[in-house]
Amino acid sequence: MKAIMVMFDSLNRHMLPPYGCDWTIAPNFARLAQRTVTFDNNYVGSMPCMPARRELHTGRYNFLHRSWGPLEPFDDSMPELLKKSGVYTHLVSDHYHYWEEGGCTYHTRYNSWEISRGQEGEPWKGQVQDPAIPDCVTPRSDSFWRQDWVNRGYMTSEEQQPQAVTFDLGRQFIERNHDQDNWFLHIETFDPHEPFFTQQQYKDLYPHGYTGPHFDWPPYDRVTETPEQVEHCRLQYAALLSMCDRYLGQVLDLMDHHDLWRDTLLIVNTDHGFLLGEHDWWAKCAQPFYNEIAHPPLFIWDPRLGVRGERRRALVQTIDLPATLLEFFDVDRPPDMQGVPLRQVIADDAPVREGALYGIHGGHANCTDGRYVYMRAPASRENKPLYEYTHMPTHMRHTFSVDEMRTMRIAPPFAFTKGCPVMRLDGRGWTQKAEPETLLFDLEADPRQEHPLHDPEIEARMIRLMVKLMRANDAPPEQFERLGLPSE
């Protein structure tokens, strides 16, 4: 048996034809839906990038105990468990956070891995002279903005873009190993993550009369741009999405050419969505996490079941994917893994959970039962108490500062740390751009989440569900206090 996972970053469910979008050009996503099961009720767990990838390895929530960071010494890694069980695992990726300090323990869990460089402002090509930067809608002055324009100068053709290189590396692995057994290939691209940089042929798919300043990198903030600028940026995203569609099609072509459908599990997923002006916000870390962010697409083909062209309503999450892969290769799940295999969901839409918990460290805690979404804001603007629990005190690009380390105390083990005490350090919440607000939505009556519901009985039920899920995750006691929730 074999498995391929094709993972995108910031892939919007509501921009894909299989989920009802009628204007983006993505025929291979439509083709994918015909060959797989499409999940209608998939939710994120921990936000954003590396917290989601920790869940993809461990099958348990990250955000209640820790922010962005590497795998911990006590974590069980799905690719490593497969490797130890004799399944060859290979990662190809241009997601540069893997080789920063805050993600440096993920890619090494595979048997082998290959990288493609140059996404976003990754410090890639060295150039002392400042690059030429056009007039932009949202100019920045930081080093990542400058570096991104340096990087773009080395991507004058599609074949030079990191996504194209990444999928070519994945194609090479499949061509070399399609007749072998017992392997897992993880193809992961940073696209369509911002900036929405692509080639003119994809932009030409979405002609429009915009003549304003350059705009393909929206800020993580409220929308202050003109309607014309917002629409232009959405079309830039769509152009990059169409590029993603092309390279997804190459994987589907290889599945057809080598008849991999007979014995190869295929998962196509993402870490989260992205706000493109909906709810008057940009990006993915604006809170609360509306469904444009929290409700991403998911497609799975399981050759053992042969179910294709069907949809599933059961509530599932990112934490279920590692369990699904372990079960497919007949590898036991570790006891700390909270996710469950999706085999029965694929077979007959059997429910696997009563609720899904999701959020970002130090931000809202959210839960859904599939119909209602409850977004619980911190009880106060101070957002305290808040602590980080870790053996790996690392932020996105650097270790914790000396000042942060001076707050360190030793905390007793959690249920999932295998008897290991952990460092407890003062935490810092994600920067709030607006006053935090607790919200309740009925997705059946209000799928766009435009009209908050005020129903004490339903809110009380969702609070009970949230507390139950937090306790099952062995959430630290101060999280209940921070959110103004009962711990029982």
Image (spheres, rainbow, N blue to C red):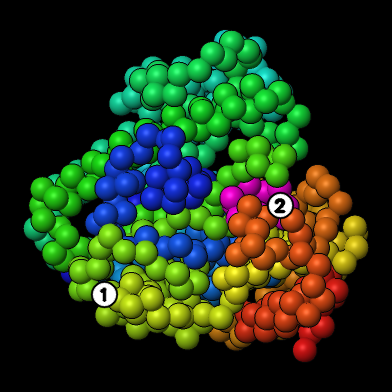
**Residue 116 shown in magenta:** no
Contact (Cβ within 8 Å) of mark 1 with mark 2: no
Magenta stretch in the rendered image? 283-293
Which mark is on residue 180? none
**Which is nearer the eye, 427 or 457?**
457
In the rendered view, tell whether residue 394 sits above or below residue 114.
below
Amino acid type, label 1: Phe
For residue 195, side relative to residue 481 (left or right): left
Query: In the picture provided, is 127 more to the left or to the right than 179?
Result: right
The residue mark sitting in front, 1 or 2, is 2
Q: Is residue 334 visible?
A: yes
Specify the label residue 329 is tagged with: 1
Q: Residue at x 36, y 20 (%)?
A: 201
Q: Position of residue 42 (x, y in %)?
A: 49, 64
**Image: 328 above or below 309:** below
Q: Residue at x 46, y 62 (%)?
A: 40
Decide whether residue 289 is among the magenta residues. yes
Q: Mark 2 = which residue?
A: 450
Q: Is residue 159 above or below residue 38?
A: above
Question: What is the total number of numbered labels drawn onto the structure image?
Answer: 2
At horizontal 11% and vertical 61% (from top left) the residue drawn is: 180
Secondary structure mostly taken by the magenta-highlighted segment of the chain? loop
- Residue 110 in the image: state x and y as whole percent: 35, 60
